[in-house]
Amino acid sequence: MEMPLWLDAIVAALILAGALVATIGSVGLARMPDFYMRLHGPTKASTLGVGATLLGSMLWFSVAQGSVSVQEILITVFLFATAPVSAHMMGRAALHRRVRCQEKTNGQPWDEMDRLSGRATQSSSSGESQR
Amino acid sequence: MTEAILPIALALFSVSLLLNLYRVLRGPDIIDRILGLDTLNVNAIAVIVLGGIYMNSSLIFEAALLIALMGFVGTVAMTKYLVRGDVIE
């Protein structure tokens, strides 16, 4: 089946926008100063970019084959369901390991954790001493 | 029009794969490397899908689905090992 021009333009715009947004997310991953900031880029920007690319590919193959392409729907649903879960687990592991955060951060995150778990509270400068 | 866009999109995704590899190799903490590997998986899915459009076959999407599945399982296993000291308790 021949692809109409407007649909071709929509697919091209989706793929290009997805590639740009995913690249911006990866630049954020490479350049941000500490881990908690680095977590933002891949979890939001890269997921959105890959989702837009998958949507464009879904439109392309649905028109080219004349039937709805199911694999892209599966990949998109799976990616959008698992990306927040894995990001949450990585953030929790970083808090557990007390990964150093930048000095300008307002409040150390593990002060509250220590208070909640009943351990001895450490001094507020524990960010530099730990790890 | 899509055929003209595809090399540009593949080049952009290759740049982001290189940036993720830089974070995996450099990462000060091990959790940075896990985050880099997870992002590498997500970007590899997009590269495989673009390759499927380029070759005009949808057979390759099963590989993308497998990479999504295995990447999630691997990330969860590594973070669980870091937090609990054991993968399956």
Image (cartoon, coloured by chain):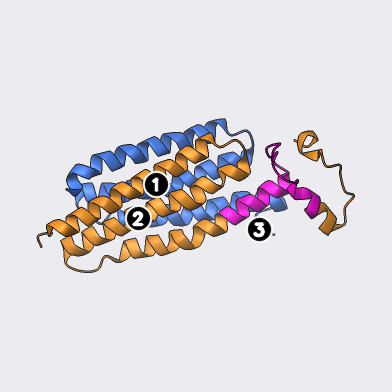
Chain colours: A orange, B blue
Q: Nearer the viewer, residue B30 or A54?
A: A54
Q: Quadrant of the C terminus of chain A?
A: top right
Does B34 sit left or right of B20 as displayed?
right
The label nearer to you, 3 versus 1, is 1
**Membership of A41 in magenta stretch:** no
- Magenta span contains residue A101: yes
**Circle 1/circle 2 CB separation < 8 Å:** yes
Whether residue B21 can be seen here: yes
N-terminal of the pair, mark 1 or mark 2, is 1
Which residue: 28% across, 60% down?
A58
Q: Which mark is residue A10?
A: none
Q: Chain of mark 1?
A: A
Read off the chain for label 2: A
Which residue is found at the position 82% from the left and 59% from the top?
A116
Q: CA distance from mark 1 to mark 2?
A: 9 Å
Residue B86: x and y, percent? 69, 52
Span colored in magenta: A87-112
Q: What residue is disc 3 on?
A: B88
Instruction: Locate residue A90, reporting x and y percent.
Output: 61, 50
Residue named by callout 1: A21
A49, A92: nearer the viewer: A49
Return the residue nearer the eye: A32 or B31. Answer: A32
Q: Is residue A111 left or right of residue A93?
A: right
Residue that numbered label 2 is attached to: A52
Dot 2: few (<14), some (14–19), or many (≥20) neighbours within 10 Å? Answer: many
Vertical placement of A95 versus B88: above or below? above
Q: Confirm whether circles 3 and 2 share one chain.
A: no
Mark 1: which secondary structure? helix
